[in-house]
Image: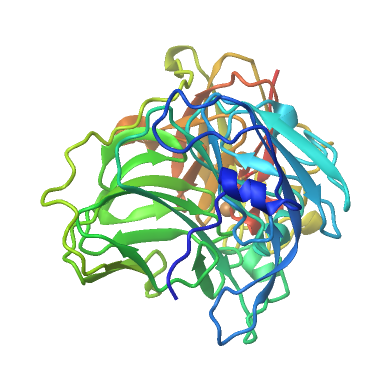
Amino acid sequence: MPINTPPELTRRQFWKAGGALALAGGLPAKGHAATATSAPVSLRLTAAPAHAPMVGDDHPATAVWAYGGSVPGPVLRVRQGVRFRAVVENRLDESTTVHWHGIRLPNAMDGVPGLTQPPIRPGGRFAYEFTPPDAGTFWYHPHDNSLVQQGRGLAGALIVEEAEPPRVDRELVWVIQDWRLTRDAQVAPGFGGRMETAMAGRLGNTVTVNGRVPDAVRVRSGERVRLRIVNAATARIVALRFEGHRPVVVALDGQPCAPHEPVGGRLLLGPAMRADVILDMAGKPGSRHAVIDDFYDRLAYELVALAYERAAPLRDHALDAPVRLPPNPLPEPDLASAERHELVLQGGMMGGMGMMGMRGAAWAINGMSMTGKGDTDMPPLLSLARGRTCVLSLRNETAWWHPMHLHGHSFRVLTRNGTAVAGAEWGDTVLVEPRQTVEVAFVADNPGAWMLHCHVMDHEVSGLMGVLRVA
Ligand code: C2O
Ligand code: CU
Ligand code: CU
């Protein structure tokens, strides 16, 4: 089955769609025109049950929960510095919220129920409105009953376009999701099982790209593609190898980085992490190259293939144009004046907490276990002075990997086990290896109560979660 692009909200579709997706105001033009309209983007996004043909025609469609009727939800495209408004309508039969992952936005728009807003009840609505300061690849997902809601499909890409994007022939968005499907292609029940909660989380048996089990993505020899990859899986870490290609990473978690090839040729993305990759299609017309995910030992599989058209190459040599992205207006941490804090990640199997502690907790941060949707009456893990640099040392005492995510800020990843990280790359989610200590630094410039949690959903809802308060 050929890989599909997730539905994209173009101006045309807005007009045609009506109902579920309605446009008021203009949608910014795609591409280069820096002078294009800066009218605010306004749309309606519905969360509702739907059916998705994920695994092909031989199987029934999968009952999912979807934004805008599709899995993943529509790719939302907005422009850096241009106001964005989304009215989210909840047609699920449980409460929900939408979190705009990685966007540095006002706390009240962050989508954490009980902490930043009341939950959106069934039949209710909530209007989110913010102006994204940073261009990049972000995403959106619920923050209420997260394990189940995201596990049933609620997730989508949110792209904030640069005023001056690098020159490429084409852009592709790959939203990766991981499903545990039954024989009749339905989402297996039993979220939050004790064993997997205390281990690697709910790993599925079916990995989709843009909502399909993909076969091949068609490419043209000689073309340059900007590939935006979003790991929207609830627990699965991926390590992608592009056979026969030399991908160049130009942004991580939406934030530009020095263009570089991934270490060892493997692009490592934990849940919630994103990468922007420039891919020069160097293969021969008619050839086929696998994109392999080999993160888990002895479980390598072909995620998708690049299938070259037979047409003559688009050009003889790779495009000679710069790939470096323009920087985002991030506040630079001042390490000399920083306040320093340690957060110890504890628990899990082989972690000494027992398999499930109180209130279903399997994990803890500094001895505290915030569970479920976040017990908002729990005291914050840390209270930070506004405007100060904070260096957080995340010490993973457990035997498991944790993609640790901070809301409302981007941080620089300074060190891993004391060794400086090349480029001190920016991110909003950092993948911490078992028994590893990672130091991150950020300016606590965004006032409010911000979640910090593991983005393995099973871990998040069972204790690996807390709140940082910026006063
Ligand atoms: Cu994508 Cu609280 O996270
Ligand atoms: Cu987030
Ligand atoms: Cu975790």
Between 348 and 425, the one lying in front of the other is: 425
Q: Residue at x 57, y 41 (%)?
A: 405
Q: Residue at x 54, y 26 (%)?
A: 37
Q: How is the image coloured?
A: rainbow
Q: Residue at x 58, y 21 (%)?
A: 444
Q: Quadrant of ligand 2?
A: top right
Q: Is residue 384 above or below residue 364?
A: above
Can the viewer see residue 369 in this picture?
Answer: no
Q: Quadrant of residue 117?
A: top right
Residue 386 at x, y percent in the picture: 63, 15
Residue 211 at x, y percent in the picture: 55, 65
Between 349 and 84, the one lying in front of the other is: 84
Q: Is residue 91 left or right of residue 225?
A: right
Residue 69 at x, y percent in the picture: 69, 60
Q: Is residue 167 above or below residue 347?
A: above
Q: Is residue 40 left or right of residue 171?
A: right
Specify the quadrant that holds the C terminus: top right
Residue that sits furthest to the left in the current view: 316
Residue 247 at x, y percent in the picture: 27, 51
